[in-house]
Image (tube, coloured by chain):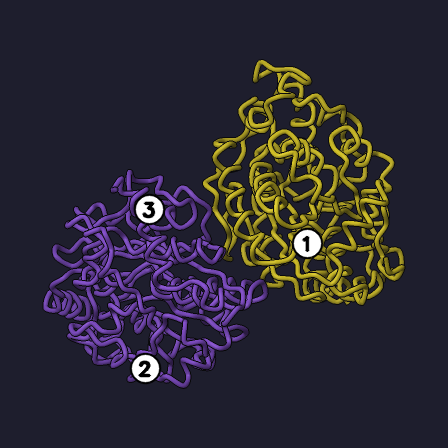
Chain colours: A yellow, B purple
Amino acid sequence: MKTSFDIKYASNQSKGEDFLNEIQAKKPLFICTIATTETGKITGISAAGKYPEFTDYTPPADAELLLLGRCKCIAGVPVTPDGIPTPALITMSSLRLADVPVLVASGGLKVKPQIPFLDFGGNPGRDIRTGNAVDNVAEVFARAKLAGEQLAKTVDYLVIGESIPGGTTTALGVLSAMGIEAEGKISSSMPENPHDLKCRAVQDGLAAAGERFGSMAENAVRAVSCVGDPMMPVFAGLVSGAASEIPVLMAGGTQMTAVLAVINALNPDVLCNVAIGTTRWVAQDTSSDICGIVSHIADVPVLAADLDFGGSRFDGLKAYEKGIVKEGVGAGGAAIAAMAATGGAVTKDMLLHEIEHNYAVLMGAK
Amino acid sequence: MKTSFDIKYASNQSKGEDFLNEIQAKKPLFICTIATTETGKITGISAAGKYPEFTDYTPPADAELLLLGRCKCIAGVPVTPDGIPTPALITMSSLRLADVPVLVASGGLKVKPQIPFLDFGGNPGRDIRTGNAVDNVAEVFARAKLAGEQLAKTVDYLVIGESIPGGTTTALGVLSAMGIEAEGKISSSMPENPHDLKCRAVQDGLAAAGERFGSMAENAVRAVSCVGDPMMPVFAGLVSGAASEIPVLMAGGTQMTAVLAVINALNPDVLCNVAIGTTRWVAQDTSSDICGIVSHIADVPVLAADLDFGGSRFDGLKAYEKGIVKEGVGAGGAAIAAMAATGGAVTKDMLLHEIEHNYAVLMGAK
């Protein structure tokens, strides 16, 4: 293992090193899985938009940023209420530095991106408090699995990220439905993690579905259908289809644990080929515990890109060091892939430089 | 060049050999571009369905056959009015023998396939006699080009096929609009080529658009918009995006000449990386002239898979030797790719054996 890789092992160092060795200098494909859910519009849940309606635009705008280097469905780029830019900026900068190809996969969208995307027949998600959040989970999963099988024949490994406002709340929903203790362990894009708000939404959803904590431990499809989101069946399907053949890096924060639980229920055999890739901001977050949740599900390593924006000349990037945003759109996994694909030639300093350049261009900052 | 390859050079042998040498033993990705147009429902135009309304189901059924090995949106497989099976059977058999990955790209569909597919924002096509056949041609082309650029980073070369009933009529439309003499040279899926019917539809369409033969020679986007079909902008965009980096085999019959004319107008520089791959049945067809049309557009080689169903034990396959169906769903190009990818290990005899096996399974024949 080259020490010049700016990657940390958040858990399971030996397996993490094996995974990193396997993907080093190999050819990845990055897939950005996007979807929308009304859950993201619950007041106080998500930082992914200034106004609740804006959450419908965040995923397509993030996807456009990755493919085009700019957004089309909105002016500028998605920002939090405080003006902190989307982590897609990190993802885009990483992928461009290492010339990694990108595909966009839709789980179900209110607003479609103005770029090519894979469709799996999914619909936008409903508020989990209805207890009936996602349509056609089994069918969408099966179609995504089929795509994962095909894509596994094209490249050496996959890196899969997501953009769905409200996604940590639906993650808590699925984990709770499946009996995995995650209360107080789920991350947030906001500086003050609204754990109580998320818990109430999940409890309301489980009650509306006539279910309770752990009652769907044996039924992942129903767990997602009741209190999940439409990103999950696509993400879990892609991993299930691809990881039987090639390594897959699940790029994201604590949301990944819910997807992991679904895969573990439907296709556990593939998990030997899977790692989670996140950011240092998630791995070191004291208001959440990604490794703790993972340890209750499966023996899967968690890698963390050692990004550091403390020295940035932009306040909008420095804010990441205060725990705002932290992760999303596969930022951590994309950074890891950029470092691994280039054999460590891409460093965290180079990344910050590229991110600052793109920040300046896209935010009109100097 | 290994003589065991069952591939013939229909034109431009030297360039064809160069192309084949370049793709030999390399890793391809097959993309099936599907769309529907009301043009396919004009009485007597297409053999792609027993009833005009059935043409809406042919493209999604063909795509499902490639990915799943069976159709979901219809029972059985698409057949001509005489019961001759879709050429997707040849494509599927070729791709499976050589383990070639498949993606499906939609140009615009009335009936969506029950599998994953790439969406480019296109709509189903209108009857070309309206003179206003296709929406958003420039935008769909741009999105497909973007996808082609990304996919070019994943594999060594692309093979792109199509399924759109009525596609030879829209091909004649675009060629005529662009001033390329093709009357009487366009192939047909039917034993008696209805040249007059196609010509009349094209003339009606040009008149309805206030245009005439050659009046859109400098405006390929408008030519497709007026008298083309929604497969074309996706196909031309994918080639334009990918062929700047990797070889692209355009898999199809005389329809490919219209797509070639569009690419030649919008991105001529990429054509040095392009070949057309078809079947012997198209290359030797006396009622059409693919090489003649190509020679008026660009210096692009035409390769032909030397398929021979004369010895088949099934009448439904023997019919291909009588000039029925001839090509479609990239059958010829897929066969060429299977031979090239395996360094000639896949032969025409092996292919026929596999096709007969799949025919028996899918058609319930013995």
Q: Amino acid at mark 3?
A: Ala
Instruction: Nearest to the eye among marks 1 and 2: give it.
Output: 2
Question: What residue is shown at x 59% (from left), y 23% (from top)?
Answer: A219
Q: Which mark is residue A176?
A: none
Left or right? Give the position of A231 relative to B17.
right
Gap in angstroms between the C-alphas marked 1 and 2: 48 Å
For the residue labelled by badge 2, is the local secondary structure a helix, a strand or a loop?
Answer: strand
Left or right? Give the position of A7 relative to A102.
right
Gap in angstroms between the C-alphas marked 2 and 3: 33 Å
Discs 2, 3 touching: Cβ within 8 Å: no
Camera sees residue A360: yes
Circle 3 sits on which residue? Answer: B61
Q: Position of residue A153 (x, y in %)?
A: 56, 55
The quadrant in which residue A364 appears is: bottom right
For the residue labelled by badge 1, is the local secondary structure a helix, a strand or a loop?
Answer: helix
Discs 1, 3 touching: Cβ within 8 Å: no
Instruction: Nearest to the eye among marks 1 and 3: give it.
Output: 3
Q: Amino acid at mark 2?
A: Ser
- Using the image, name the chain to which the residue with label 1 belongs: A
Q: Which of the pair A160/B109 is nearer the observer?
A: A160
Seen in the picture, residue B259 relative to B57 is either above or below; the reply is below
Q: Position of residue A366 (x, y in %)?
A: 77, 67
Q: Amino acid at mark 1?
A: Ala
Quadrant where the N terminus of chain A lies?
A: bottom right
Q: Which of the pair B88/B161 is nearer the observer?
A: B88
Q: Which of the pair B276/A77 is nearer the observer?
A: B276
Q: Which mark is residue B11?
A: 2
Q: Position of residue B226 (x, y in %)?
A: 26, 66
Camera sees residue A109: no
Left or right? Give the position of B323 relative to A203.
left
- Using the image, name the chain to which the residue with label 2 belongs: B
Instruction: Nearest to the eye among marks 2 and 3: give it.
Output: 2
